[in-house]
């Protein structure tokens, strides 16, 4: 390659570290995406004859304007962090775990079994036992599609969706059969549920310490979720498994030629994802209800996919994405009280945010890549790696938009 | 030098003139005041290293990029070309390296796409016109055939016909032979000669000097976005052209080190599998480079992948220093001392969106040196290793933290080489190790492979480039339909090896 010996001077002239550039670029992308989503949302609000600033203020006021509001936001975020982490772990390995929903439903059953049968244990032992039971439940449910994928090549999207259906029915069966309540007061009408868990097996209310109403059900599970995010970050970025997972997710051929076992890597990811999924339902049964209800909250697994997108599959990004999601969800209350804008506006805004985040990040990523190319300084690099993209599909919009939204391609 | 075509001489006015064309990409000056003249009825070769600006210049002419400076004259008139549509209207067509055809359509349907001529589709008439057009230039293409069933060479002919159907007089071909087998290239050259006789002008972008010397009437050499020379082939030589391209003398024949040939490192016997290997046997000894020559698609890929463990052979034995490795995992085979340079470095060599250090680690992530018992990576150590490799192999990169996709093709290949050679493998499998690289990078890769031999290791070189086989091999075998059809000394005449590549090796050849 060496043309006249020395590298061209461009490489030396400006030396901002790559990570700083990446960070600044992403921060900028994030701000831009928020701005675009908020402006688009404003148009909708105006169409309803309301003042966008008033509406946004009322949303923020309801969610962040009081200790109670913040408590609610964080409580909403707690299960979403687990759910999005579960989704993102599979994403890293190039897989789409649509089955978080079913995995946490099954995990709630196994956790309930542990609660009701290990009630002789003292609290400090009972709670860990319950959490382990939940993770095992999630892993078992994730193992099925995982093994099917590795052994038979069955696509995980199809199998996990079917496992979700089975899980829903399984909860119904458990509540009608082995877990059916018998502790209800005589003659009282009670929804289908399990017996109430022993009090020492519950995740105690944390809100009281911060002046948050017990109604928010804020619990230490929030901290567990944050710890889980840090563990996942470490796993993906600092361990062999995470490294192999990312290689498999980005280039299966190169990973295989590098001696990585694709099947074993993907199966392990699925099990980890299942364990994380197992913790999604804990907030509901340990902090909120104190018993296993019949599918009250369905959809945490699917919302987790959205949150994972919003957090760009970055574990730390997911924490913030879940909190943002919580802010908007809490804002629903304000909309109903103080404006003519229907509550579904929140769902639209959430959708807009996902779209703008995904798109602006993609643009930022390309810009950064182009910038790094020119920093490398050689004209050849441009022609080699950037230009063919344009030449291979000269008239093709098909290779710009589609790729931007494809989840598996992300790092 | 021009043959036929009448208008080729120096006296006639140029058909197309590019004056002071400048094209900038952020941070890169791709074309720097380039002047170029195309005359009617000539094959004009545009050569240069990857990134010299040849494709960019032609994309400017074809209206894909707006120029930042300069002007374009066609038949003496200054024109603005804002899009490929404008270019075609001015009689300029371009065939890209990657074809843009609709696979389920027939040849005719593909050719008339966008030029249907009215609401009522008269496929029969179009088909006839295309058949006549193809006939007149000796293109062997069935206008009724479905594109997805065509070979690469045939698809290329369809692309060229597509341009001719639109009445193009100036045809730009971007590295047309990069995707062709040697015999397909020969057919293409026959077609090009016919087009030249008919007075069409052809721009032939390439970095393969042999071809350029064979087909071109004039050669323009670009280096770093500038024209460094223009010459007819008769007044230059391969060595002179290479020097112009690279900016320094290039060695086409490297000194082969003399090494004592030792015991067999690799012994393959009666290997079959995937319908592509049919009883293949060969042997590579220590200090020896065995060149496997053959037309692509005769089992090269399957052979390499079976040896590294990506495929399990149906039958046969593979022994590395006497112990069987057939059907074992890639991981085990690598640890047993096999290095692998894949023929497709993006598919099997690098994870493009991962960093250089992550790519340098690939294949060694389980080494106790780089990860602990709990699976935690020792990133600092990996980065140190990567920095060392970058220095040792002169890989041009800003830091170990940039993505592998930001490297040029030559530097990507260097990174793979560096990684694979770092472990001192007993056997190196090098599959098409210089594919798509320019002269300077090829020289570097060749040197590294010869160094392996000098260090007494075995090298299995699989290549479709006969030049490369000759330059490096101690022994040459030919591969045809999954079988070794002949063994030759390194000085065997190419005709004999060519026979072996076609499966007709005479016994006395060896």
Image: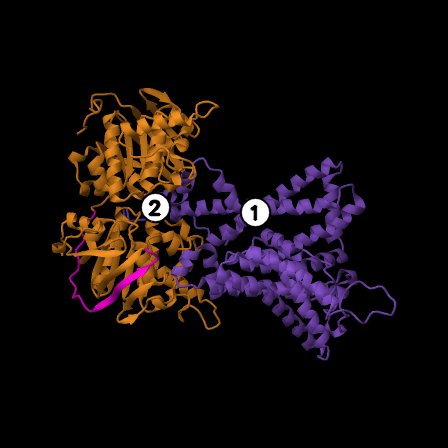
Chain colours: A purple, B orange
Chain identity of mark 1: A
In the figure, is residue B282 to the left or right of A292? Answer: left
Residue B70 place in picture, x, y as percent: 36, 28
Disc 1, SS: helix
How packed is label 1: few (under 14 Cα within 10 Å), some, or many (20 or more)? many
| Label 1 vs 2, first from the N-terminus | 2
- Residue A87 image position (x, y, % from top left): 58, 58
Q: Chain of mark 2?
A: A
Which span is picked out in magenta? B250-275
Frontmost residue, A88 versus B35: A88
Q: Nearer the viewer, residue B114 or B199?
A: B114
Residue A341 appears left or right of B382: right
Residue B467 percent location from the top left of the image: 21, 49
Instruction: Give the main secondary structure of the magenta stretch.
Output: loop
Residue pointed to by mark 2: A8
Residue at (19, 28) in percent of width and height: B2
Q: Residue at x 29, y 65 (%)?
A: B316
Q: Which residue is mark 1?
A: A358
* Label 2 neighbour load within 10 Å: few <14, some 14-19, many 20+: some
| Camera-nearest residue between B497 and A328 | B497
């Amino acid at each position: 390659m060496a043309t006249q010996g020395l590298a061209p001077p461009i490489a030396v002239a400006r030396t901002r570290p790559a990570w700083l550039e990446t960070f600044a670029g992403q921060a900028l992308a994030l701000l831009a995406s928020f701005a675009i989503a908020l402006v688009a949302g404003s148009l909708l609000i105006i169409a309803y004859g309301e003042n966008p600033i008033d509406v946004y203020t009322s949303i923020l006021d309801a969610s962040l304007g009081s200790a109670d509001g913040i408590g609610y936001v964080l409580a909403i975020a707690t299960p979403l962090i687990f759910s999005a982490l579960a989704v993102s772990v599979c994403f890293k390995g190039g897989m789409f775990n649509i089955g978080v929903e079913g995995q946490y439903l099954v995990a709630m059953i196994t956790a309930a079994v542990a609660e009701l049968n290990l009630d002789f244990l003292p609290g400090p032992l009972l709670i860990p036992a319950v959490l382990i039971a939940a993770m095992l439940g999630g892993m078992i449910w994730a193992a099925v599609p995982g093994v099917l994928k590795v052994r038979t090549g069955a696509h995980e999207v199809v199998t996990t969706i079917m496992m979700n259906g089975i899980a829903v029915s399984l909860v119904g069966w458990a509540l009608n059969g082995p877990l059916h309540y018998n502790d209800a007061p005589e003659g009282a009408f009670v929804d289908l549920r399990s017996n109430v868990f022993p009090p020492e097996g519950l995740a105690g209310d944390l809100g009281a310490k911060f002046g948050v109403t017990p109604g928010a059900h804020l619990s230490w599970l929030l901290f567990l979720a944050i710890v889980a995010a840090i563990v996942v970050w470490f796993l993906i970025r600092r361990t062999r498994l995470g490294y192999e997972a990312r290689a498999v997710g980005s280039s299966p051929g190169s990973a295989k030629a590098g001696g990585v076992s694709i099947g074993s890597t993907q199966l392990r990811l699925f099990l980890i994802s299942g364990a994380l999924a197992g913790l999604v339902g804990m907030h509901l049964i340990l902090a909120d209800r104190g018993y296993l209800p019949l599918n009250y909250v369905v959809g945490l697994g699917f919302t987790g996919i959205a949150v994972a997108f919003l957090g760009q599959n970055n574990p730390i990004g997911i924490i913030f994405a879940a909190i943002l999601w919580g802010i908007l969800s809490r804002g629903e209350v304000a909309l109903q009280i103080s404006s003519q804008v229907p509550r579904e506006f929140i769902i639209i805004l959430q959708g807009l945010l996902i779209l703008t985040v995904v798109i602006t990040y993609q643009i930022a990523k390309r810009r950064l890549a182009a910038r790094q190319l020119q920093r490398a300084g050689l004209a050849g690099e441009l022609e080699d790696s950037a230009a063919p993209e344009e030449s291979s599909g000269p008239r093709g919009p098909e290779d710009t938009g589609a790729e931007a939204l494809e989840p598996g391609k992300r790092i | 030098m021009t043959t036929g075509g009448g208008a080729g001489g120096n006296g006639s006015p140029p058909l197309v003139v590019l004056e002071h064309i400048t094209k900038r990409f952020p941070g890169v000056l791709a074309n720097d005041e380039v002047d170029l003249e195309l005359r009617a009825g000539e094959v004009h070769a545009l050569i240069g290293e990857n990134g010299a600006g040849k494709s960019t210049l032609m994309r400017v002419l074809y209206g894909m990029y707006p120029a930042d400076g300069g002007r374009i004259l066609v038949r003496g008139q200054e024109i603005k070309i804002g899009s490929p549509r404008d270019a075609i209207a001015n009689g300029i067509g371009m065939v890209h390296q990657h074809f843009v055809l609709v696979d389920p359509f027939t040849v005719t349907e593909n050719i008339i796409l966008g030029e249907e001529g009215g609401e009522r589709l008269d496929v029969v008439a179009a088909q006839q016109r295309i058949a006549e057009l193809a006939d007149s230039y000796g293109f062997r293409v069935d206008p009724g055939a479905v594109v997805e069933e065509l070979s690469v060479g045939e698809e290329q002919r369809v692309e060229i016909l597509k341009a001719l159907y639109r009445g193009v007089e100036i045809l730009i071909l971007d590295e047309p032979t990069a995707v062709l087998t040697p015999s397909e290239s020969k057919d293409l050259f026959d077609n090009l000669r016919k087009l030249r006789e008919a007075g069409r002008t052809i721009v032939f972008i390439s970095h393969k000097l042999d071809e350029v010397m064979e087909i071109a009437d004039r050669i323009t050499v670009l280096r770093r976005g500038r024209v460094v020379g223009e010459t007819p082939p008769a007044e230059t030589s391969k060595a002179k052209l290479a020097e112009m391209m690279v900016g320094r003398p290039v060695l086409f024949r490297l000194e082969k080190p003399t090494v004592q040939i030792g015991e067999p490192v690799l012994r393959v016997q009666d290997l079959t599998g995937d319908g592509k290997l049919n009883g293949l046997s060969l042997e590579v000894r220590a200090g020896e480079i065995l060149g496997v020559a053959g037309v692509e698609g005769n089992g090269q890929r399957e052979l390499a992948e079976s040896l590294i463990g990506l495929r399990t052979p149906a039958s046969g034995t593979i022994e590395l220093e006497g112990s069987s490795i057939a059907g074992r995992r890639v991981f085990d085979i690598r640890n047993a001392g096999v290095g692998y340079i894949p023929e497709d470095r993006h598919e099997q060599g690098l994870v493009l969106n991962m960093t250089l250090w992550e790519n340098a680690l690939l294949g060694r992530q389980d080494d106790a040196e780089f990860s602990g018992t709990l699976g935690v990576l020792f990133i600092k150590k990996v980065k140190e290793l990567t920095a060392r490799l970058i220095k040792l192999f002169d890989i041009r990169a800003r830091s170990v933290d940039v993505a592998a996709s930001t490297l040029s093709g030559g530097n990507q290949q260097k990174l793979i080489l560096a990684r694979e050679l770092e472990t001192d493998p007993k056997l190196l499998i090098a599959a098409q190790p210089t594919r798509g690289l320019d002269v300077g990078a090829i020289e570097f890769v060749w040197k590294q492979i010869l160094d392996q031999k000098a260090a007494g290791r075995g090298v299995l070189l699989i290549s479709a480039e006969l030049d490369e086989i000759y330059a490096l091999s101690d022994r040459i075998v030919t591969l045809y339909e999954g079988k070794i059809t002949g063994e030759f000394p390194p000085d065997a005449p190419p005709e004999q090896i060519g026979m072996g590549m076609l499966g007709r090796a005479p016994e006395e050849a060896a």
